[in-house]
Image: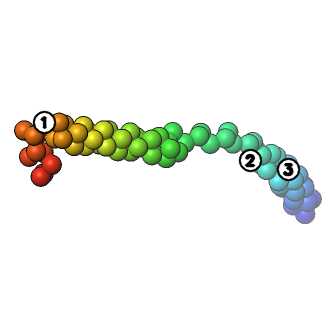
Amino acid sequence: MATSRILFGVFAVAALLLSVSLPAVRAQSLPPAPSPTSDGTSIDQGIAYVLMLVALVLTYLIHAADIFPAFEFYITL
């Protein structure tokens, strides 16, 4: 009977220590997440540059066709 009381006391103390110390292990804060490498604005800017280049080429072809009649077949494409 005495050994069961001592064993119960040991288990009670161990449970108390573990219940106090284990949440402290998980209490470490995680480092902040890294910022996204692309937030979409760089993709939008790339699309805008491509569209401006297309507009520049089309403008050049249209004005070149006005100046030189030999380039009229570019307009019919």
Seen at 23% across and 39% down, the residue is 63
Q: Amino acid at mark 3?
A: Val
Tell me if I can see residue 61 in this picture.
Answer: no
Q: Are marks 1 and 3 in contact (CB under 8 Å)?
A: no
As rendered, which of 33 and 76 lies closer to the eye?
A: 76
Q: Are marks 2 and 1 in contact (CB under 8 Å)?
A: no
Vertical arrangement, residue 15 with respect to residue 44, above or below: below
Tell me if I can see residue 22 in this picture.
Answer: yes
Q: 8 left or right of 45? A: right
Q: Secondary structure at mark 2?
A: loop
**Percent from the top left, x then y, of residue 50?**
34, 41
Give the label, 2 or 3, closer to the camera. Answer: 2
Q: CA distance from mark 1 to mark 3?
A: 88 Å
Q: CA distance from mark 2 to mark 1?
A: 77 Å
Q: 46 left or right of 57? A: right
Residue extending farthest to the bottom is: 1
Seen at 12% across and 52% down, the residue is 76
* Labelled disc at residue 18: none
Task: Residue under label 1, please give it.
Answer: 68
Q: 36 left or right of 43? A: right
Answer with the quarter of the image where residue 2 lies.
bottom right
Seen at 17% across and 36% down, the residue is 67
Q: Secondary structure at mark 3?
A: helix
